[in-house]
Image: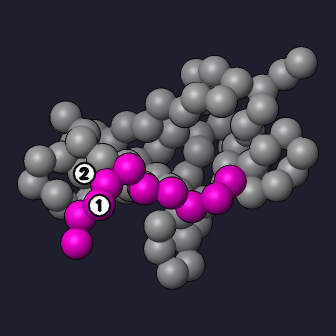
Amino acid sequence: FGSALRPFGVKEIRGFRVCGMDKVWHSATGILVGANQVEVSSPEVVAPIAVRYAWANNPECNLYSRDGLPATPFRTDDFK
């Protein structure tokens, strides 16, 4: 059946940001680990508490569905 998600152009998924308890956001990359699962990491954040995808005015992002539709922006935090 194949993966339901896929990066466009490269193996690493771009467009993620993560933060730790200090709430300072850092660029992160994602790797597909399942049909609908992405593992996100950044060397600057040892213990992430939140993640955002395509959460910018003009984000560089490359995550698409199997049908070729771009993944929608999301965030897991509610920080002000």
Instruction: Determine the residue positioned at 47% across, 74% down.
Output: 56
Type of amino acid under label 1: Asp
Residue 33: x and y in percent read 58, 22
Residue under pointer 2: 19
Query: Residue 28 or 50: which is nearer the viewer?
Result: 50
Front tag of 1 and 2:
1
Instruction: Determine the residue positioned at 38% across, 50% down.
Output: 76
Tell me which corner region of the image, top left, top right, bottom left or bottom right, holds residue 65: top right
Instruction: Determine the residue positioned at 18% across, 60% down.
Output: 24
Q: Is residue 43 above or below residue 70?
A: above
Residue 8: x and y in percent read 75, 49
Q: Kindly state the secondary structure of the residue where label 2 is placed.
A: strand
Residue 68: x and y in percent read 87, 51
Residue under pointer 1: 78
Q: Is residue 40 left or right of residue 19?
A: right
> Which portion, as a residue range, is magenta?
71-80
Q: Is residue 35 above or below residue 18?
A: above
Q: Is residue 78 above or below residue 51?
A: below
Q: Main secondary structure of the magenta part?
A: loop
Marks 1 and 2 sit apart, C-alpha to C-alpha, by 12 Å
